[in-house]
Image: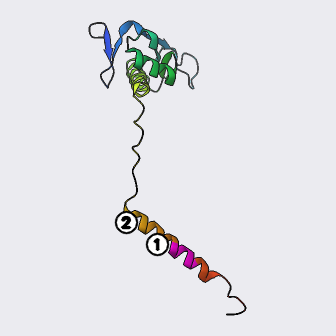
Amino acid sequence: MEPVDGHHVTPRGRRIRADAVEWQASRSGGPGGQHANTSDTAVTVTIHVDRCGLPPVVQQRVLDTVGPVVVASSSRTRSQWRNRQLAWTEALTRLDEAAQPPPAPRARTRPSRGAREERLSDKRRAAERKRDRRRPHADD
């Protein structure tokens, strides 16, 4: 989570400028009475896509997918440190998934001769089965 030479690195190796990341701690919700939940353990991390320093193509892909900011928050644990880790991991995962290029279109292929013959024989069998289920004609 600590930036290295002014950059954070995502799990897939993308470098994000440290000044594009904002952290905010707040009180976690939940049950409790007086003096309960008074520590700021919930964490929200915001990554501003336009400040990340991503290549233009990747930046546009992320903007189109998730918008101008990637936000993740966590209040699952009672530890702010752990919630920071969880929110950070989730934010980086979202950013990486949004930055992935779309899959290449499938190359068209022709069915093999055996596949065509099998399909036609299946059709013939289905037609025979339906023909056998019909009522016989009066002249039969």
Type of residue at label 1? Ser
Local packing at callout 2 (Cα closer than 10 Å; few below 14, some 14-19, many 20+) is few
Looking at the image, which is closer to me, 97 or 125? 125
Residue 65 placement (x, y as % from top left): 50, 25
Picture layout, residue 47 above or below residue 130: above
| Label 2 – label 1 distance at C-alpha | 10 Å
- Residue 140 is left or right of residue 29, and the answer is right
Q: What element carries label 1?
A: helix
Q: Position of residue 16 (x, y in %)?
A: 36, 13
Across and down, in percent, residue 133 comes to 62, 81
Q: Which residue lies furthest to the right in this view?
A: 138
In the picture, which quadrant includes the N terminus? top left
Which residue has dot 2 on it?
114
Residue at x-position 50% and y-position 16%: 69
The residue where tag 1 is placed is 121
Q: What stretch is highlighted in magenta?
A: 124-129
> The residue under label 2 is which amino acid type?
Gly
Give the color scheme: rainbow, by chain, secondary structure or one colour. rainbow
Q: Residue 96 carries which label?
A: none
